[in-house]
Image (cartoon, grey):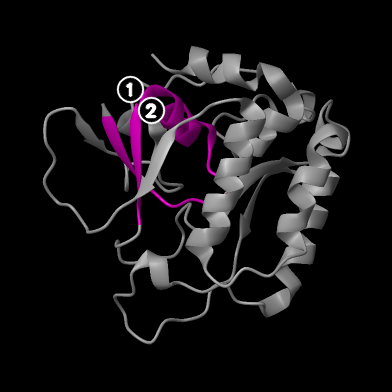
Amino acid sequence: MTVYLSSAYLAPVEYYTKLLAYGQVYIEQHDHYTKQTYRNRCTIAAPDGALALSIPTVKPDTLKCPMRDIRISDHGNWRHLHWNAIESAYNHTPFFEYYKDDFRPFYEKRYEFLADFNEELCHLICSLIDIQPVMKRTSEYKTEFAPGETDFRERIHPKKDFRLEDPDFSPQPYYQVFQERHGFLPNLSIIDLLFNMGPESLLVLQQSNQ
């Protein structure tokens, strides 16, 4: 079974259930980059509720720029702002102290390309959760899929309702630090699960796959 996914910044829980469920994963490099997708944004549980963090990108020369060519902008001191937001959101979670030194370097080192940054973060998270997906970058943009191939490139999307897009995904509630204030917030960035649940993250992912 093969799944096609877009590149994603600290992707939501749903995305990682696909990395767990499929034997072969292709990360799309040749899609036209569009804003307001998980390619450059994630959603975390902040003290005031769900908070979207977006990585600024360099405006491409052409309207139809492939994802693999999208460069990260240094605009607005975003690395510092994102790390501060993550720290203030997750400082009191059971596992933030345990994992923070794995994540901090991503907010200190400068990456040129968004796809590289997302990929290295994804590999780190997979190793921390203890999943070993076989991941490859696409070599072309496919529009037709064979039996056994599934296309989630545009279905896992912050503007789309996962309940309608993905009936196989049933987010299992888990402990969240601000739950008493906001209730359980499903399908946040994978770091929300990781910092709250640590090694049990894998179990939650398994239970969220129908």
Secondary element type, mark 2: helix
Residue drawn at (87%, 39%) of the image:
91
**Which residue carries the number 2 mark?**
163
Res 47 visible: no
| Residue situated in front as seen by the camera: 93 or 27 | 27
Residue at 45% across / 25% down in the picture? 20
- For the question of whether residue 23 can be seen, the reply is yes
Residue with the mark numbered 1: 167
Examine the rendered structure and indicate whether residue 126 appears above or below residue 56.
above
Whether label 2 touches label 1, CB < 8 Å: yes
Q: Type of residue at label 2?
A: Arg
Relative to 62, does residue 210 appear above or below in the rendering? Answer: above
**Residue 129 in picture, x, y percent from top left:** 63, 27
Nearest the eye: 43 or 113: 113
In reply to whether residue 12 is colored magenta, the answer given is yes
Dot 1 alpha-carbon crowd within 10 angstroms: few under 14, some 14 to 19, many 20 or more? few
- Vertical arrangement, residue 38 with respect to residue 54, above or below: above
Left or right of residue 168, residue 120 in this image? right
Q: Quadrant of the N terminus?
A: top left
Q: Is residue 25 magenta?
A: yes
Residue situated furthest bottom in the rendering: 61
Q: Is residue 108 left or right of residue 38?
A: right
Q: Please state the extent of the stretch shown in magenta in the rendering.
A: 2-28
Find residue 210 and report its horizontal and vertical position in percent.
Answer: 38, 13
Task: Name the spot of residue 63 as percent of width and height, x first.
Answer: 31, 80
68 vs 206, left or right, is left
